[in-house]
């Protein structure tokens, strides 16, 4: 037999990720680099009503989604392991629902979520949190899935091949702690150049957010100016032309202060030379200069356009359908956008399930002595939304009347469940 030919096992190229000493430099926009960029992304999430609505809407969809632990092997050992993992998820100090909500927000805002798996021994009711559990079988379980806020992750540690070894987190005391990847789960919206921080789902909304934010401020100031007018103070020319340090300059400074304090919220006024009549100045004069009241640009339309574009990258325009007379969800366009939105959430949930199935569950099973991956349970999410009842009814009417589907008790109970109706009793006839 000819000897086996071994290929070159060395890595020759690189991922393209720009980083220096673990600090990432893969963002080209100066305003979104490093800690400054994370502050801007958090500002978008916490201050902007459109972004806040999108995050709340996505979180609502996700939190209504059912979680399943399946037994792919369809064996008694697989069923036992699925039950064990379900117990561990339910036995954590913070519910998985709360963890999922926090993780989803981190993914949307920052593009990644770093979660530390904290273990415990299941020793029943115990004052030591490392051993306290609803179960007393002595097995290793999860104490908590601790989210490590993305804006506290300072830098990353990479091996010689570009793989992720872990992250350094900034502590409240000012120091830092290393969180090895073997004890953590890394969730990312997408993987670009091997970047451990993924890509913020708000990244493509930033430009629209910037313009919408500034236009809102300009619009508000403009409305206020239209209602109150602009303070105008007229003074003798000598006051205007006074040199620094002179008595007239001091008077001018006091007048400027007076003019600015007339409007406490917007410190602005206009100082002009006093009017002259027949070569004589009238001295000091004060008035409010009114706005003409008409504008060549409809700021409301422009702002709404930018707000709509903020939602486009997240496929979340569906949340604003029906607003201001636009087509609602009943239209074909609304249905298409809703379906695209639901598919984007489904894809994000698949991204969340992958690290759980690849790392969290196998590590837990190995800690408890189970080395056969064939009997490990699989973590999955249920459908993001229920079928539309009108569409479901039309489908069943067509398929049942053509005898493609035969109605039975299982089908009836499924339809009842989708409609939010109680399940049929055994003695009731199948409709």
Image: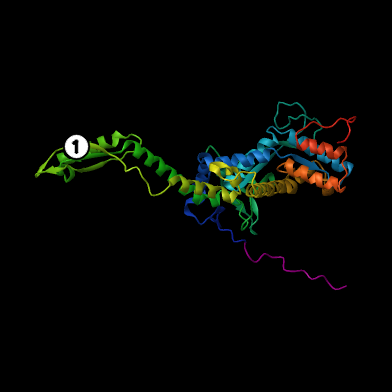
Query: For residue 292, what is the image quadrant?
Result: top left
Residue interval drawn in magenta: 1-14
Classify 56 as above or below 305: above
Q: Residue at x 43, y 47 (%)?
A: 298
Tag 1 secondary structure: strand
Q: Nearer the viewer, residue 397 or 376?
A: 397
Q: Residue at x 66, y 35 (%)?
A: 98
Q: Nearer the viewer, residue 265 or 298?
A: 298
Query: For residue 114, what is the image quadrant?
Result: top right
Q: Residue at x 13, y 39 (%)?
A: 282
User: Where is mark 1, residue-wise?
Assistant: 285
Compared across the picture, whether 417 is left or right of 148 comes to right
Q: Is residue 67 visible?
A: yes
Residue 232 picture location, percent across and down: 25, 40
Of all residues, the one furthest to the bottom in this rendering is 2
Of all residues, the one furthest to the front in this rendering is 401
- Which colour style is shown? rainbow
Q: Is residue 174 visible?
A: no
Viewport quadrant of the C terminus: top right
Compared across the picture, whether 50 is left or right of 96 comes to left
Residue 339 picture location, percent across and down: 67, 48
Viewport quadrant of the N terminus: bottom right
């Amino acid at each position: 037999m000819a000897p086996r030919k071994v290929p070159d096992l060395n890595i020759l190229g690189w991922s393209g990720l720009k980083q220096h000493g673990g600090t990432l430099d893969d963002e080209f926009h100066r305003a979104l680099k490093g800690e400054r960029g994370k502050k801007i992304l958090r500002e978008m999430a916490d201050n902007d009503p459109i972004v806040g609505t999108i995050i709340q809407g996505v979180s609502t969809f996700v939190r209504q989604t059912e979680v399943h632990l399946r037994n792919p092997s369809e064996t008694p050992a697989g069923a036992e392991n699925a039950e064990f993992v379900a117990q561990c998820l339910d036995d954590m100090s913070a519910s998985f629902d709360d963890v999922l909500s926090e993780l989803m927000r981190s993914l949307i805002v920052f593009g990644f979520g770093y979660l530390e798996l904290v273990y415990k021994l299941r020793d029943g009711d115990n004052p030591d949190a490392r051993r306290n559990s609803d179960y007393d079988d002595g097995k290793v379980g999860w104490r908590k899935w601790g989210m490590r806020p993305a804006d506290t992750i300072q830098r990353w540690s990479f091996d010689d091949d570009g793989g992720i070894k872990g992250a350094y987190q900034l502590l409240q005391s000012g120091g830092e702690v290393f969180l090895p990847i073997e004890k953590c789960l890394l969730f990312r919206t997408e993987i670009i150049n091997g970047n451990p921080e993924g890509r913020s789902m708000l990244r493509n909304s930033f430009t629209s957010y910037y313009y919408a934010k500034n236009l809102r401020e300009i619009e508000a100031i403009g409305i206020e100016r239209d209602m109150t007018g602009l303070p105008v103070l007229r003074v003798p020319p000598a006051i205007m032309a006074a040199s620094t340090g002179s008595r007239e300059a001091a008077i001018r400074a006091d007048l400027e202060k007076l003019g600015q304090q007339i409007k406490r919220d917007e410190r602005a006024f206009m100082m002009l030379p006093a009017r002259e009549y027949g070569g004589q100045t009238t001295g000091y004069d004060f008035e409010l200069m009114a706005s003409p009241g008409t504008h060549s640009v409809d700021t409301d339309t422009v702002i709404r356009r930018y707000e709509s574009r903020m939602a486009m990258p997240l496929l979340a325009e569906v949340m604003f359908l029906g607003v201001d007379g636009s087509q609602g969800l009943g239209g074909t366009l609304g249905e298409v956008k809703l379906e695209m939105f639901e598919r984007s959430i489904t894809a994000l949930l698949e991204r969340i399930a992958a690290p759980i199935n690849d790392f969290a569950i196998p590590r837990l099973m190995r800690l408890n002595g189970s080395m056969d991956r064939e009997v490990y349970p699989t973590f999955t999410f249920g459908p993001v939304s229920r079928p539309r009842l009108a569409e479901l009814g039309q489908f069943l009417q067509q398929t049942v009347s053509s005898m493609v589907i035969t109605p039975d008790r299982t089908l009836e109970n499924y339809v009842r469940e989708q409609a939010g109706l109680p399940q049929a009793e055994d003695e009731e006839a199948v409709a």
